[in-house]
Image: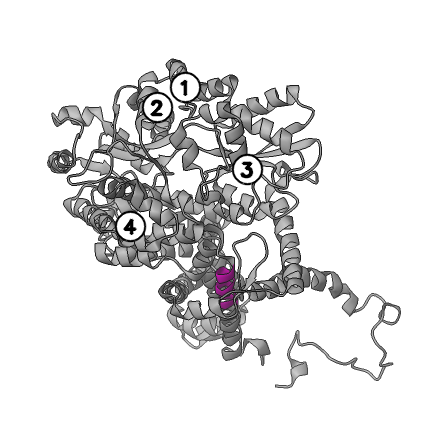
């Protein structure tokens, strides 16, 4: 159906566009951006990481690496919000990073399609210590087309059902063990005048977490796996419709209150609601704890509780399954001049010193022997719960918006938001998703 | 009216029968600048406006995920454009936002500007305060309004019940979110247009008011018979800026509503952004961009043509 542009015309357009894109990237990066040296130079390794409070772990790794290596790694911290855009625009240009941070799956699928990344599968086969160093489900979650392109390099981020101990105590309630418990708790807390579940519905991704867990519990991890493998008919699976109906049931029952569509996560709207005893539960990524610790330290210390998402009646999915961001990964640009050094560098993520730094930073590392170290975590109980939860999980589904190519992820998020807002009925939702 | 009577009109020929040579630096001395002066500007305009725009048009006939080479898909993006309900909604929302912005901003800016053109001391101070929103960046303002509109902890929690949003769910409600965008944008840009009207109103000769006063016109009559006609050109300038500004309006939507709830505040520029930089569907985003450029250019040309602004006729003829 699609014809390739005539080669000459295509090249010219691409070259001119690349020049414009490259100059805008340079302008946007300003002084912190990659300068003339660019990716692919000999003797240096350009490493890009998502710029946030956790980059100190990678800073240390670079320092250690440079001590023993002739090739010097140089870390570029790309400000969070624009990370995807910048990486994307840089990848086709001479300013591309040699080694870069990503979310695995769909976030790098387009790069894999264009043969821009180093296939790490042979390395994982050759070096059993490397593969054995990480929890299997987490390494697997980063796969694209059944091949490994990423080495886990940050903490794990499963989605956890948090609850507010103060509110539960006041209502004389217990954390939910089953779906029936959850529905009953909705009614209990409504009577108490407390929002049962805090939900940051102005953003679509916190709503996505609900859809992910419900579908996993209803139909098992296989349903989304089929979707991720490109079978859009899988959206027609009865488990998807059931999930959409359960969402509607929760919304109609008042599980999220009435104004969730105006609440943000990034401005801390939902988390504050939860910490101020005005919401009883909050389904959120494991970073919620660190977030509460930064903004409401008292609540993080003695008010916050956690549990896993319960099983559903007649659900086919394993209730031990987990959804979320397994972790972040290092991937290697196929054009990097210093391939060997790049490989050595990504392997440092399995080293003792690196894992220790992660724990000290409040992360729960994705390494298989992290258990011992978690005692050094500043909330050891929470860290151990999280670690056990992930380690025991038969399947860890990567957040859908990261797992799917962005061309599908965007409209999917919009449809989910419309389902929550009642602008799409469960049936229309299924139809809309099948059309993606 | 003969063109020469209009001040500011370009005089095409030297008035006397002087040598009709190409104006050159040697002959005209320090006189009118030659075409050479325009070269840097033209060069920049070509490089950073014309060429990228042509590239965008070319890209709209391709499928490109931002990596590798674009693939030629002919009119696929364009036919998709006509069938896309989201695009239709976005165009409708953009038109609505533009129309309502104009209807809302013009009278307020006009009245404020005329008022601020007065001379009393308190007006200067108050005007300075009115202009404050103009000084802050849109992003900072959008963030500020977003916290004010937080349904649980913002101002809207207290005043929501009085304006029809008892749960403070303003940004989560389709009409509410649209109204919020309209209001914040107006709040931010009214000062700029006020400034234009203030400048315009100060230019009106006092003799006109004196004459009107002698004829027995009151304040209201003076406003409609003297001020408003005299401000005709300012109204047109301000309207063109307002319309083009509203059509390309973007940052407040990005921060305040993210195009939501659902797609209910997804105006055309925002749809272009999400298609291009969230979904990385560059080809389709280019088609949207081309449509936007065409609409904005068309509308501003139309405004200029219909209002006779291009003739630049002075409001002070015969004085």
For residue B85, side relative to residue A37 (left or right): left
Discs 3 and 2 share one subunit: yes
Magenta segment range? B283-293
State the CA–CA distance, disc 2 to disc 1: 8 Å
Q: Mark 3 or 4, which is nearer the eye?
A: 3
Indicate the secondary structure of the residue bearing disc 1: helix
Q: Is residue A138 above or below residue B264?
A: above
Residue at which label 4 appears: B172
Residue at which label 1 appears: A370
Discs 2 and 1 share one subunit: yes
Residue at which label 2 appears: A387
Q: Identify the mark at residue B189; answer none if there is no mark.
A: none
| Quadrant (top left, top right, bottom left, bottom right) of the C terminus of chain B | bottom right
Residue found farthest to the front:
A126
**Contact, CB < 8 Å: mark 2 with mark 4?**
no
**Contact, CB < 8 Å: mark 3 with mark 4?**
no
Residue at which label 3 appears: A78
Mark positioned earlier in the residue sequence (1 or 3): 3
Q: Main secondary structure of the magenta part?
A: helix
**Contact, CB < 8 Å: mark 2 with mark 1?**
yes
């Amino acid at each position: 159906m699609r014809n390739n542009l005539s080669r000459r015309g295509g090249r010219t357009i691409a070259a001119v566009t690349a020049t414009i894109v490259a100059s805008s990237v340079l302008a946007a990066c300003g002084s912190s951006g990659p300068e003339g040296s660019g990716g692919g130079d000999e003797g240096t390794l350009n490493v890009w990481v998502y710029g946030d409070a956790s980059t100190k772990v990678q800073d240390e790794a670079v320092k250690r690496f440079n001590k023993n290596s002739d090739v010097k790694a140089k870390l570029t911290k790309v400000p969070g919000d624009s990370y995807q855009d910048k990486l994307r625009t840089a990848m086709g240009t001479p300013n591309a990073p040699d080694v870069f941070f990503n979310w695995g799956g769909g976030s790098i699928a387009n790069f894999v399609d264009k043969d821009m990344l180093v296939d790490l599968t042979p390395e994982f086969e050759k070096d059993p210590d490397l593969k054995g160093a990480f929890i299997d489900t987490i390494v697997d979650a980063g796969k694209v087309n059944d091949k490994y392109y990423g080495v886990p390099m940050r903490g794990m981020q499963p989605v956890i059902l948090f609850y507010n101990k103060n509110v539960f105590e006041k209502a004389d309630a217990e954390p939910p063990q089953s779906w029936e418990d959850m529905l009953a708790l909705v009614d209990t807390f409504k009577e108490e005048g407390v929002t049962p579940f805090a939900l940051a519905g102005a953003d679509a991704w916190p709503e996505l977490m609900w859809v992910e867990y419900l579908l996993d519990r209803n139909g098992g991890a296989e349903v989304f796996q089929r979707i991720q493998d490109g079978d859009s008919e899988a959206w027609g699976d009865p488990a998807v419709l059931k999930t959409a109906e359960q969402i509607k049931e929760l919304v109609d029952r008042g599980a999220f209150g009435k104004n969730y569509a105006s609440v943000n996560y990034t401005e801390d709207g939902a988390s504050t609601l939860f910490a101020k005893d005005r919401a009883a539960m909050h389904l959120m990524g494991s970073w919620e704890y660190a977030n509460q610790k930064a903004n409401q330290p008292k609540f993080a210390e003695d008010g916050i509780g956690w549990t896993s998402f319960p099983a559903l009646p007649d659900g086919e999915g394993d209730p031990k399954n987990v959804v979320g961001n397994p972790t972040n990964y290092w991937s290697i640009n196929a054009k990097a001049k210093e391939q060997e050094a790049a490989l050595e560098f990504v392997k440092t993520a399995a080293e003792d010193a690196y894992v220790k730094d992660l724990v000290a930073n409040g992360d729960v590392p994705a390494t298989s022997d992290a258990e011992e170290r978690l005692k050094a975590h500043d909330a050891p109980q929470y860290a151990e719960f999280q670690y056990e939860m992930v380690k025991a999980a038969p399947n860890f589904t990567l957040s859908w918006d990261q797992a799917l190519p962005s061309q599908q992820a965007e409209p999917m998020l919009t449809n989910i938001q419309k389902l929550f807002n009642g602008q799409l009925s469960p049936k229309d939702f299924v139809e809309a998703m099948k059309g993606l | 009216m003969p063109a020469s009577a209009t001040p500011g009109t370009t005089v095409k020929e030297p008035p006397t029968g002087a040598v009709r040579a190409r104006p050159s630096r040697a002959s005209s001395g320090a006189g009118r600048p030659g075409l050479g002066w325009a070269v840097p500007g033209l060069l920049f305009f070509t490089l950073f406006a014309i060429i990228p725009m042509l590239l965008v048009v070319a890209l709209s006939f391709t499928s490109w995920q931002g990596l590798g080479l674009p693939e030629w898909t002919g009119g696929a993006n364009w036919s998709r454009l006509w069938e896309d309900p989201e695009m239709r909604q976005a165009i409708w929302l953009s038109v609505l936002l533009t129309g309502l912005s104009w209807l809302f901003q013009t009278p307020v800016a006009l009245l404020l500007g005329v008022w601020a053109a007065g001379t009393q001391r308190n007006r200067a101070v108050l005007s300075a305060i009115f202009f404050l929103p103009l000084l802050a960046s849109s992003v900072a303002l959008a963030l500020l309004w977003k916290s004010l509109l937080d349904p649980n902890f913002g101002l809207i929690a207290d005043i929501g019940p009085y304006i029809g949003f008892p749960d403070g769910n303003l940004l989560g409600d389709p009409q509410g979110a649209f109204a919020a965008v309209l209001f914040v944008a107006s709040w931010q840009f009214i000062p700029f247009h006020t400034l234009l009207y203030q400048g315009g109103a100060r230019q009106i000769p006092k003799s006109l008011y004196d004459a009107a006063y002698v004829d027995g016109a009151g304040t209201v009559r003076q406003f409609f018979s003297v001020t408003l006609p005299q401000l005709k050109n300012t109204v047109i300038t301000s309207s063109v800026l307002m319309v083009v500004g509203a059509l390309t309006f973007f940052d407040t939507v990005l921060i305040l509503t993210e195009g939501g709830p659902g797609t209910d505040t997804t105006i055309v520029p925002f749809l272009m952004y999400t298609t291009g930089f969230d979904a990385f569907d560059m080809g389709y985003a280019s088609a949207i961009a081309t449509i936007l450029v065409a609409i904005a250019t068309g509308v501003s040309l139309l405004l200029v043509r219909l209002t006779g602004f291009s003739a630049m006729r002075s409001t002070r003829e015969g004085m």
